[in-house]
Image (spheres, grey):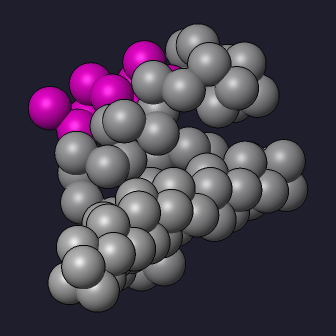
Amino acid sequence: MAGVRSFFANLFASFSARSSKEERIGAYIIREHERGRQLTEILDDPYIRNRATEREVARLLERPEVVKTLGEAAVTEAQNQLG
């Protein structure tokens, strides 16, 4: 029984870790953009490259709150550069 609990605890912990990681990366992108930096420049930061795959970044750029904050044009340009 303890093995099952441990399995599910680890499973849910990994979900929340990914979620909080995405939240931190998203917050970084938004914060840097509000400081006046271009989105393509931000996505090239070592902070982003070392913490997120291209797929994770692409998923972040699909989030409505990110698109609203950064603007559709900036997000579309960044998505085109990702591939």
Magenta span main SS: helix
Q: How many marks?
A: 0
Q: Position of residue 42 (x, y in %)?
A: 54, 58
Depicted 82 relative to depicted 71: above or below: below
Look at 24% across and 60% down and name the residue there: 53
Residue found farthest to the top: 72
Q: Position of residue 72 (x, y in %)?
A: 58, 13
Q: Is residue 18 visible?
A: no
Residue in the foreground of this view, choosing between 77 and 65: 65
Q: Is residue 82 one of those drawn in magenta? A: yes
Q: Is residue 62 one of those drawn in magenta? A: no
Q: Is residue 70 visible?
A: yes
Q: Position of residue 35 (x, y in %)?
A: 85, 56
Query: Residue 5's quadrant in the figure?
Result: bottom left
In magenta, the rendered stretch is 75-83
Residue in the foreground of this view, choosing between 57 and 72: 57
Query: Residue 39's quadrant in the figure?
Result: top right
Look at 47% across and 32% down and name the residue there: 61
Look at 71% across and 56% down and name the residue there: 27
Look at 62% across and 56% down and name the residue there: 23
Query: Residue 82's quadrant in the figure?
Result: top left
Q: Quadrant of the N terminus?
A: bottom left
Residue found farthest to the front: 1
Q: Is residue 77 left or right of residue 80?
A: right
Q: Position of residue 9 (x, y in %)?
A: 39, 74
Q: Is residue 12 left or right of residue 16?
A: left
